[in-house]
Image: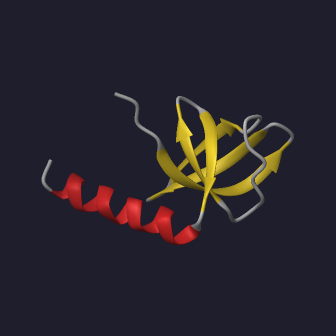
């Protein structure tokens, strides 16, 4: 099973972007497969941004993850 998590692009540095997964979790990811802009959301899998997604879809997915993790 593959899992991709939405994250917001907060900085761009060539083929690398710093993304925010929420709750203070920041990571650098490779963006060579997509062309995101600052403030957009991307789906991240294994250190690569694999798709740009709209804000509404990203926020709903993150909300669902928070709900799931409450019961862990």
Number of numbered discs = 0
- Tell which residue pokes out farthest to the right in this image: 14
Where, by quadrant of the figure, is residue 53 drawn?
Answer: bottom right
| Residue 11 sits in quarter | bottom right
Of residue 1 and residue 5, the one placed in the foreground of this image is 1
Relative image position of residue 1 (x, y in whole percent): 34, 27
Residue for point 55% across, 53% down: 7
**Image position of 47 with respect to 24: above or below:** above
In the image, residue 22 lies at what x, y percent?
47, 59
How is the model colour-coded? Answer: secondary structure
- Please give the name of the residue rendered at 55% of the width and 41% of the height, measured from the top-left corner: 44
Residue pushed farthest left?
71
Residue at horizontal 65%, vertical 37%?
Answer: 29
Residue 58, horizontal then vertical, whole percent: 49, 62
60 is higher (above) or lower (below) than 42:
below
Residue at 73%, 36% (x, y): give it: 33
* Place of residue 20 in the rendered image (x, y in percent of width and height, measured from the top left): 57, 55
């Amino acid at each position: 099973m593959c899992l991709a998590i939405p994250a917001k692009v907060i900085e761009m540095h060539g083929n690398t972007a710093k993304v925010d997964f929420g709750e203070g979790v920041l990571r650098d990811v490779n963006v060579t497969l997509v062309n995101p802009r600052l403030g957009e959301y991307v789906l991240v899998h294994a250190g690569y941004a694999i798709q740009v997604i709209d804000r509404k879809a990203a926020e709903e997915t993150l909300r669902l993850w928070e709900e799931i993790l409450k019961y862990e």
